Amino acid sequence: MRLFKDALARRGMSLVTALPGLLVLLIVVGLFLKSKAILGVAPLSRLLFSSAWHPLKGEFGLWPFITGTIWVTVTALVLAVPVSILAAIYLSEYAPPWVRDAAKPVIDLLAGLPSVVYGVWGVLLVVPFVGNVLAPLAGVYSSGYSVLAGGLVLAIMTFPTIIHVTLEVFSSVPRALREASLSLGATRWETTRHVVVRKGAQGILAASVLGFSRAFGETMAVLMVVGNVPAVPRSLFDPGYPLPALIANNYGEMMSVPRYDAALMAAALVLMLIVLFFNGLARRILIRVERRVR
Amino acid sequence: MKAPGAGLLRRRKRTEVVFRVLTTGSAVVVLLSLLLILGTILWKSVPALSLSMLTQTPRGGFYLGKGGGILNAIAGSLYLALGATALALLLSLPLALYLNTYKGRASKTAVWTRFFLDVLWGVPSIVYGAFGFVVMLALGLRASLLAGMLTVALLEFPIMARAIDEVMRLVPRELKDASASLGATRFETAAKVMIRQAAPGILTGILLAFGRGIGDAASVLFTAGFTDRVPTSLADPAATLPLAIFFQLGTPFPEVQQRAYASAAILTLIILIISLAGRAMSRKVTRHVVK
């Protein structure tokens, strides 16, 4: 009887364990089936690289949205990656233990704040800041609802991801290596640069890639500050219209216009595939790093 | 007379100081950004925060600046997140137990499952929303509390499963061996030893997932719908806090926007309470843990 229960539990549990892989597949297949209606009508290149977005005329070019996503994400990363990595270096190499302990809840909380809260904060503070301070400084006019505002908000949202992974990578660098370097007379920074960062270089790359894919798919916070004008942005102060925002904004109308829903599902599919690729890449790197340390 | 190499030494010292300042400064920027966000939200919300916000549902003309509160959204969010978290736990716990009792730490199954969980963790919530919508249409469901719960459960699943898996990995081998040597089957070991030993971590995982679930907007946008009433059954549409904030902010009326700030403050407070509770509780449930 007990053995039977054990066997039963084993079966049941192994089924659940197959779920993650299955789910990835299901999402891709599900979105693909729904976007087939648009993939069949226009060639893939027109869907991806055309700037003509006129749903009522049946023209669905995703190019403005793809470039919008890239602009916002790259802006965010340019801001977030250096700050996050330097902060991680401080926390792992310089900070006294109590600061390190106190920093953990701060990072967890930043990661846990809902994206709408980031969005509200962005509307309250970042958008006016960009519109009234940064844009005049740069000598251009901007309403503030811009790629830059989106990038700033996103940068803060990606801090925790990058810091967390980088810290983990740093903590896997053996203590003895640092001590060897210090005992040779190297300063803290020299040790960090030549030992810790060199050993963890791949991990840092993976952390940044993870930050990238986190930023790439962020919806609400960006949607609220980025302006949502379906045109390819020309500067940081132009509004943009990222893919996730497109999907979120148009869910209401999509059932009433022919093939609109298929176009949006195609957008979701593009998003999923890109994130899948980068995530998979980063995780492969991290698994390799982990294996090498052991 | 200067010692040879003094200039070089000074330069190295200067580099050290520069980078010490840079790294410390970066950490301060991270901390400050959190304080700035919390500070702005709480400060801006003060004028509109009131008890009626918490205890009333929207009255007629609420979105034009008339009276009422956001009880519908608070209740909807809580129901939704509770249901989703329970569903996610139902999936996560067996998965983590299976990986850690039936499968070896470095077995192929374990490595691949963790890989897929990590990948799922990174899938944007809007994609879950779109996928949930597709499934909803396929099953003939309408936007409802149930559909929202299912979608959010999928979103929470990788977060919770990974968190529980991480703590179960730390359960010492000897403990499992001791249990096995007393004649327990693996299932008994899992149910009686692993769960108890990992209890604090499981709780943290649950709260982490709950926090993500209650704060997520993009996944419920298509699936849970929106309504001014508190949902009474699984088939009713349900309002959620993040969407309530989003819709209120989108109106052109300053009074309603004020209330969006207040709603954001309420959501932030809920998240703060969850994370504090998690810290306090994980210390308390350590009673049964063998050190």
Image (tube, rainbow, N blue to C red):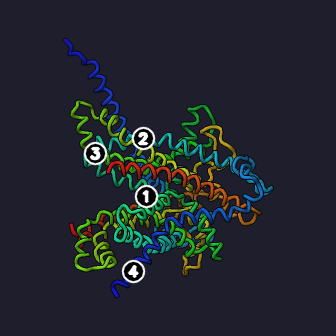
Looking at marks 3 and 2 on the same chain, the residue that comes earlier in the sequence is marked by 2
- Picture coordinates of residue B168, whole percent (x, y): 33, 66
Q: Work out how far the residue at label 2 is from the one at label 4, CA to CA, in angstroms.
A: 51 Å
Amino acid, disc 2: Val
Name the residue that disc number 3 marks: A174
Looking at marks 1 and 2 on the same chain, the residue that comes earlier in the sequence is marked by 2
Q: Nearer the viewer, mark 3 or mark 2?
A: 3
Q: Work out how far the residue at label 1 is from the one at label 2, CA to CA, in angstroms.
A: 19 Å
Which residue is found at the position 73% from the left and 47% from the top?
Answer: A50
Q: Nearer the viewer, mark 4 or mark 1?
A: 4
Look at the numbered discs 4 and 1 and tell me whether their residues touch, using CB distance below 8 Å: no
Amino acid, disc 1: Gly
Name the residue that disc number 4 marks: A7
Looking at marks 4 and 1 on the same chain, the residue that comes earlier in the sequence is marked by 4
Say if residue B55 shows up in the picture.
no
Residue A166 as seen in the image, left or right of residue A70:
left
The image quadrant where one finds the N terminus of chain A is: bottom left
Looking at the rendered structure, whether the residues under marks 3 and 1 are on a common chain is answered as: yes
Other residues around mark 1 within 10 Å, as few (<14) / some (14–19) / many (≥20): many
- Picture coordinates of residue B257, whole percent (x, y): 56, 57
Which is more toward the observer, A254 or B248?
A254
